[in-house]
Image (cartoon, rainbow, N blue to C red):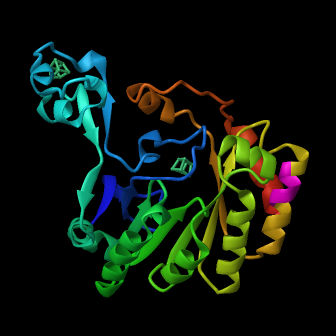
Amino acid sequence: MGKIFDIQHFSTGDGPGIRTTVFFKGCPLHCLWCHNPESQSVDTQVFYTPSKCMGCRSCEKVCPPGKDIRHSIECAQVCPTGCLEAVGKDMTAQEVLDEVLKDKTFYDNSGGGVTLSGGEPLYQPDFAFDILAKAKQEGVHTAIETSGCGKMSDYIKLITVTDLFLWDIKVMDEKRYQQLVGGTLQRVLDNLRTLHRLGASLRLRIMYIPGLQDQPEILSATQALLKELPGVPYDVIPYHPYGNSKREKLDMEQIVFPVPNDDQVAEFYRKLQFANS
Ligand code: SF4
Ligand code: SF4
């Protein structure tokens, strides 16, 4: 049994082909630009959207004493309008797989499969392993999107059931990483180098916020990493403040970074391409 918050069918940005993406609850990091802030806590949470309230007061009848309705799952369960919405669901690996297999024909025709995302799938490593092992038995291509901050022993175990690791490179500077992301960059790089040495299939996802990842010393550290991993493909992931609408529903403060335009993204990509060629 594990906890997820969404299963998205027909994804095209989470690995090759048409995919089903399973979003895990729980992440040890707190990237300020996170698109899915509801993924960070492993607990079920409640989205609160006041504009959807029709004033029926059903929630008040079931709200446990002393609880704020915005944080009560009991209230969300009776809310008829989606003003209160529980985020998080317990499922077994087999239940997740049954959902994934509904799209098997699309995977077979497009070279797609299943991707575990989140949150951090390595926060529930046994659950992740069980889903992917079952998927492999069914002949489904498997991918994990990870921040790289899990335990090395878990990554090594997952290699046997993972066809592709989509690996986040958030910011190549230890101090900035700790400030903005909340974890340890060195751990991410140690895990990455180990998986590369062991022959895991990797694809890097390099975050880009103008004025951050293109600072000269951070850019040159990113270029050096690409040189160290020749032939490992990568994508540039431009910042977008998608997460703020969800932060509002969770009563979290709004955080905005500069949004890059197409020219800035192309220029950043060009500088990395030069290093990777
Ligand atoms: S149950 Fe939902 S719609 Fe009804 S009062 Fe409570 S929050 Fe509003
Ligand atoms: S690692 Fe991913 S899920 Fe975790 S906080 Fe960062 S962006 Fe969000």
- The N terminus appears in which quarter of the rendering? bottom left
Q: Residue furthest top?
A: 55
- Highlighted magenta segment, given as a residue range: 218-222
Residue plotted at (72% across, 41% down): 179
Residue plotted at (90% across, 49% down): 217
In-front residue for pair 152/66: 66
* Residue 146 falls left or right of residue 198: left
Q: Position of residue 187 (x, y in %)?
A: 70, 65
Q: Is residue 103 above or below residue 133?
A: above
In-front residue for pair 10/190: 190
Q: Position of residue 156 (x, y in %)?
A: 56, 81
* Residue 231 falls left or right of residue 30: right
Residue 232 seen in the figure: no
Could you tell me what secondary structure mostly forms the magenta stretch? helix
- The C terminus appears in which quarter of the rendering? bottom right
Q: Position of residue 115 (x, y in %)?
A: 42, 65
Residue plotted at (73% across, 50% down): 171
